[in-house]
Amino acid sequence: MKNKNYYAILMAGGVGSRFWPVSTEAFPKQFHDMLGTGDTLIQKTFKRLAKLIPQENIFILTNARYNNLVLEQLPQVTQRQVVLEPAMRNTAPCILYASLKIQKENPNAVMIVAPSDHWIEDEVIFSNNVQQAFDFCIKNDALMTLGIQPTFPNTGFGYIEFDKSSKEDIKNVKQFREKPDYETAKSFIKQGNFLWNAGIFMWTAKSVIKSFQMNQPALFSLFEKGVNAYNTAKEDDFIQDNYGKAENISVDYAIMEKSKNVYVLAAEFDWNDLGTWGSLYDKLDKDESRNALVNARVLAEDASGNLIRTKIDKIVVVDGLQDYIIVDKDDVLLIFPKSKEQDIKKVLHKVKGKFGEQYG
Amino acid sequence: MKNKNYYAILMAGGVGSRFWPVSTEAFPKQFHDMLGTGDTLIQKTFKRLAKLIPQENIFILTNARYNNLVLEQLPQVTQRQVVLEPAMRNTAPCILYASLKIQKENPNAVMIVAPSDHWIEDEVIFSNNVQQAFDFCIKNDALMTLGIQPTFPNTGFGYIEFDKSSKEDIKNVKQFREKPDYETAKSFIKQGNFLWNAGIFMWTAKSVIKSFQMNQPALFSLFEKGVNAYNTAKEDDFIQDNYGKAENISVDYAIMEKSKNVYVLAAEFDWNDLGTWGSLYDKLDKDESRNALVNARVLAEDASGNLIRTKIDKIVVVDGLQDYIIVDKDDVLLIFPKSKEQDIKKVLHKVKGKFGEQYG
């Protein structure tokens, strides 16, 4: 029997434009089967959370335009569980809003907030780590995060510095650090008490709301006024009238970096943010030439280290290409060096300018 | 008023496998708009011939499986004009057969035999050259060919050696030479009296049939037995029963290389056999980076000299590729160096072996 007090908030409002042309504004990354497993990323994430958390307690935070995609891909979810942001306001407003809704439904709720588009290998270890964090949050007034043991000085992630002296699994966070330059990242790794910030948070509804009340009184008061309306027919009107007034602010900045009761547990599972084509390539199975194929059937001559993605069973003959991203969609073909993956956002911008917004 | 004695035989039975994946057994090159002009190659060829030759006198020789493609692409053509080979027997049997049909219909016929898939720029000069050859054939018992002035020592074509001493436009042919090696080709060019064999022939029905009778008596007698049946309801049965018995032999070898009355006129029009992706690239318009685009809309970074063909208006982003053939079809994507274009037949063979005959 799963614990009825366990809740989850899945963050599913992003666009993932570094995965263009697969990920587009109309059909973002989390709704694609990026790994070729048969499940989209949000489906995989939902299943992983549903091992520990009652299905009906998993809420999906997303943009109004993705409402139908969520309901189609997660048929076990009802409209009650899909929390729609009428405007883009970063993570703090929507997390506060969803937390107030959940608290109204269950004042004893303890919840995990997690991205819908990350890759986590071992679901049992993941559940165990979340369980350990939940137990801590129930006993303590704590804002918890799962930190990822860094494997190299990645400059694309934020870092969490924890208290080196602690002997506990769950340690006090000293500070959050934004994406560092390479030298700083190297020093973080060397010091040994830095973890990657994966954007996974756990807390009781009570603790997170209290932290918003203390650290973001304006935001808190904006959404607190709606509590009577939440989970009733009046909610829509209230949100339409008020959501746009919220400050555009991340949950990290709004509460995590300001609170004293922030703790981290070093995750024991393999994790990948699937943030770029290169990180996806790392996670995919490779053939004998280190080509990673998604859906494609490939004849490769002198071609290795490529990521090749097409519609199901398309044949690709490739000769003389090393370390390329080859993505074929119905209306767009991308042939792009993996080493330039960070430029894909720029390419997307150029494509939109040259051929029209509909291609992004 | 076009001359009612003028006829044409369009050769449209080939497969063009070096243009895979666009050209396939089910849908060969001559039925594709390879140049992106709005016309398929056979449509362009038909229109060019129809400037001089009455439409109803243009016959198309092809394989039975392409009958519908011919009638679809040339709606001005009736079934009477589509001469179907029930078996692959090279060019001599089908040319003899069609010539006997034409002679029965019009004993004064003078005809051109021409490939359906070549590129010829100037249609007026083409018509003038053919007219000049027709006039010669009517006055003389002659087998004529149009030779192409060579621009470089191409080892992929046959050559025609003509009588150097002649001062006439139309010269006696000394001999036909098969595809030479590079040094031989260079010496041909140096000698100055060698032309490329473009597979374009002109003769009266009377002269070509006489030449078959003299040089290929067995083949002649096989098809001559059917004369009563040709152009009647009995023709189909006769051809089904007898065509397969014909020797597999080219018209060059069967009569041209054996006859004394062979003449050549040096063509004055620009010509390209469109035999490979590279020769097609040469004929296409290029953008400022020397990329040749057919149907595609392209964003190219550090990419030049490429031939890029897709369905209409597909967007292609390509970065870091030089001198590639990029061909995207619904079920096949080819990314292949132009310098290896002669290997495409091998690639096709591998693809069929690995993924199935249906892809060729």
Image (cartoon, coloured by chain):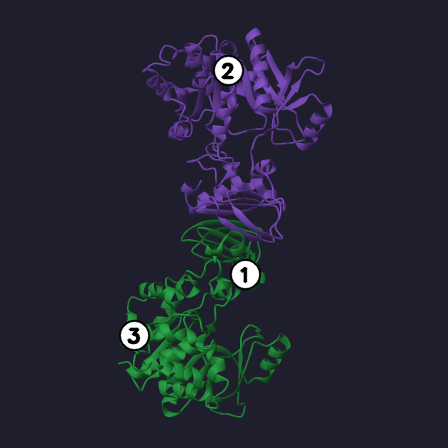
Chain colours: A purple, B green
Mark 1 sits on what residue? Answer: B344
Where disc 1 sits, the SS reads helix
Q: Residue at x 51, y 29 (%)?
A: A117
Mark number, residue B80: none
**Coordinates of residue B310 in the picture (x, y in percent):** 45, 54
**Coordinates of residue B209 in the picture (x, y in percent):** 39, 86
Q: What is the spatial separation of the Cα atoms under label 3 and label 2, in whole angstroms?
A: 79 Å
In the picture, measured across the screen, residue A302 lies left or right of residue B240, that is right
Question: Which of B200 and A350 lies nearest the eye of the viewer?
Answer: B200
Q: Amino acid at mark 2?
A: Met
Image-quadrant location for residue A24: top left
Q: Residues within 10 Å of mark 1 (few under 14, many from 20)?
A: many
Q: What is the spatial separation of the Cα atoms under label 2 and label 1, in whole angstroms?
A: 58 Å
Q: Amino acid at mark 3?
A: Gln
Q: Residue at x 56, y 41 (%)?
A: A343
Location of residue B175 with respect to A29 vertically, above or below:
below
Q: Amino acid at mark 1?
A: Ile
Location of residue A108 with respect to A124 vertically, above or below:
above
Question: Which of A315 and B185 lies nearest the eye of the viewer?
Answer: A315
Q: Residues within 10 Å of mark 3 (few under 14, many from 20)?
A: many
Compare marks 3 and 1 and give the one earlier in the sequence: 3
Mark 3 sits on what residue? Answer: B55
Image-quadrant location for residue B73: bottom left
Q: Are marks 2 and 1 in contact (CB under 8 Å)?
A: no
Mark 2 sits on what residue? Answer: A111
What chain is tagged by disc 1?
A: B
